[in-house]
Amino acid sequence: MFGPMTPTSPGGPRASARRAETNALERELRAQVGAGTGPEDPISRAMEIVGDRWSLLIVREIVAGHRRFGELHRHLGIAKTVLSARLKALVAREILQPRPYHREASGRDWHEYRLTQAGIDLYPILIALQRWANTHLSDE
C-alpha cells in the first residue's frame, strides 16, 4: 500500500521536500539576519526600542491619523501613565516628533505626534505583522 520509509526521510517524500524547503528558508534567514545574536545584535537593539506591547501599536495609530494623546488613549485603551512613558521614549529615540497644536492660558502646550523618518521606516514591520497574524492567527 505505502512504500517503505527510510531513516533519512521519515514521513515520506513530501515530508522530506518540506524539510528541505524549511532548511533552505532557515539558511536564507540566517544569511539575512547574520550570525550575530545576543544583546548587541541589531534585532535585540531594535526590540529594546519597539519590542514592548505598546510601541508599534502607537505607531500604527499615528499612521491611522490618531496623533493626539487623547485619541491614542481612546483608541488603544492604554493607561495614561504608560502612554505618556511610551510617547516620551519614542520621542527620545526620534521615532516620533511632538508638534504643539494648542497653548493653554497657563502656557502649557498640547502636542500631537508625527512620525519621523525612523518612524515611517517601521511601517513595513507593521504590514509584515499584520500579514503574519492574518496567516497564522486567523482561527483565534
Image (cartoon, rainbow, N blue to C red):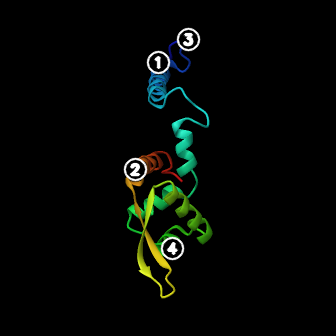
Question: Residue 109 vs residue 124: left or right?
Answer: right
Position in image of residue 103 (x %, y %)? 44, 82
Secondary structure type for disc 3: loop
Local packing at callout 3 (Cα closer than 10 Å; few below 14, some 14-19, many 20+) is: few
Between disc 3 and disc 4, the foreground one is 4
Give the residue pinned by disc 1. 13
Secondary structure type for disc 4: helix
Between disc 1 and disc 4, the foreground one is 4
Q: Mark 2 is on which residue type?
A: Ile
Q: Mark 4 is on which residue type?
A: Arg
Q: CA separation, marks 3 and 2? A: 42 Å
Secondary structure type for disc 2: helix
Between disc 1 and disc 2, the foreground one is 2
Label disc, if present, on residue 6 of the rendered structure:
3
When the figure is inspected, residue 30 is found, relative to residue 93, above or below; the finding is above
Q: CA separation, marks 4 and 2? A: 23 Å
Question: Residue 49 vs residue 124: left or right?
Answer: right
Local packing at callout 2 (Cα closer than 10 Å; few below 14, some 14-19, many 20+) is: few
Give the residue pinned by disc 4. 74
Position in image of residue 109 (x %, y %)? 47, 77
Q: Residue at x 55, y 42 (%)?
A: 45
Q: CA separation, marks 1 and 2? A: 34 Å
When the figure is inspected, residue 64 is found, relative to residue 132, above or below; the finding is below
